[in-house]
Amino acid sequence: MKTKTHRALECSALFATAALLLTACGSSGGSGNGGEAGTSFQGRGPITYVAGKDTTGVVPKVIARWNAQHPKEKVTFVQLPTDADSQRQQMIQNAETKSDAYTVLSLDVVWTSEFAAHQWVDRLPENQFPLGKMLKPVVETAKYRGGLYAVPASSDGGLLYYRTDLLSKAGISAPPTTWSEMTADCAEVRKKVPAAKGMSCYAGQFQKYEGLTVNFAEAVDSAGGVVTDASGKPNVDTPAARKGLDFLTGSFKDGSIPKEAITYQEEDSRQAFQSGKVMFLRNWPYVYSLAGKGKLAGKFAVAPLPGLNGPGSSSLGGHNLALSSFAKNKATALDFMKFFSSEESAGTFLKDASLAPPYADLYDKAALVGRYPYLPVLKQSILHAVPRPRVVQYGDVTSAIQREAYAALNGSKSSAQALKDLQGALQKSTAQ
């Protein structure tokens, strides 16, 4: 931490113990692991909110509402690239230089352990956030070693988007629950619906970035395998995991997944679905709002992700708000975090951007379910989601997963070899 020699001398005459000294002279900025018992968040004034590029247009509106109410404590929205890996890299670079340019960080839920362990973000006061109203799995993503280092702003669960109009024309009344059913449905649609003959069956996110880690983990989990076991140890070189990866590699080989999907990120795959290139799409809930405004309005619905022998498992997604340890104006930052993560703001993001709220009761309100019929499916997706590896060296872990999964998908390695190599790489990363 930055030394506070002069403040310490001034306070020492008033407080006898070092513990009381630290409590009274808590830093309003600079480095440190704030938020522990007795530490105060001080300093008011302008701050920044740092997140990936907003494709919904809602974030600036929410920030504008704060700025109108707090003209002397305005928030500037710093937009990073759309892909998660680039966001993480830029946030880490800012932290390693101990820059105060970033104040409130929008962290992918899997980054909490890494940022907390390196003391890049402050520990937060749990009693100042309505955690009891939030979904438990979502709250757990914000914790590290029993402490709260972020506050949930949005959650995410993978959903299967499907073309109800095409399935209906083919005489199919319900979405598939297994991979084999999905493949069979696609064949039936192409056979009976002339307009669908040139369509591929399925798409997800398979570019070598965080989305591939998500799609790979979901395939493994949905086949009964695991990437890491309950104790955090890698256990990916198994027959079950191979079945999951084989589903993806086999789908690329037989054309069920279009070859160009090897380059797909979230937006690429959304556009492929909306333009009629694929019948089924694995993506996040934000797609619902965007697809509903285009030519597919009223022609699609969502279902749980399919798996090997029944409904599959989603990876748990979402974003949490964290406070940079090196930021200034932390009192303002804490208040903004409360505002941005409030149930009111969550309702706005749900209504205007289809972002999954962390608050449990928003999924059960009849008026909201009537307007957003995907909410019950989304809630179950989140409650039954499987977290990606929650490890300090997450960057190394996800890089290894992306490297080996991509090698299997592009045919440069067999599924068996890729999983064997991945097991070895994960053992090294988690042992650090």
Image (cartoon, rainbow, N blue to C red):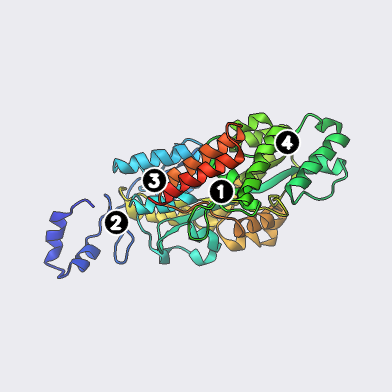
Residue assigned mark 2? 42
Q: Residues within 10 Å of mark 4 (few under 14, many from 20)?
A: many
Q: Residue 26 lies in what quarter of the image?
A: bottom left
Q: Is residue 10 above or below residue 186?
A: below
Q: Marks 4/2: CA distance?
A: 56 Å
Residue 299 at x, y percent in the picture: 77, 41
User: Mark 4 to mark 1: distance in Å?
Assistant: 25 Å
Indicate whether 118 appears above or below 186.
below
Q: Nearer the viewer, residue 256 or 353?
A: 256
Q: Mark 2, mark 3: which one is toward the viewer? A: 2
Marks 1 & 3, CB-CB < 8 Å contact? no
Please name whichever residue, 424 or 136, is drawn nearer the observer in this view of the structure.
424
Observer-side mark, 4 or 2, equals 4
Q: Dividing the picture into quarters, in which one does residue 19 lie?
A: bottom left
Quadrant assignment, res 143 = bottom left
Which residue does the numbered mark 1 point to in the structure image? 237
For disc 4, the marked residue is 256
The residue carrying mark 3 is 74
Whether the residues at callouts 4 and 2 have beta carbons within 8 Å, the answer is: no
Secondary element at image label 4: loop
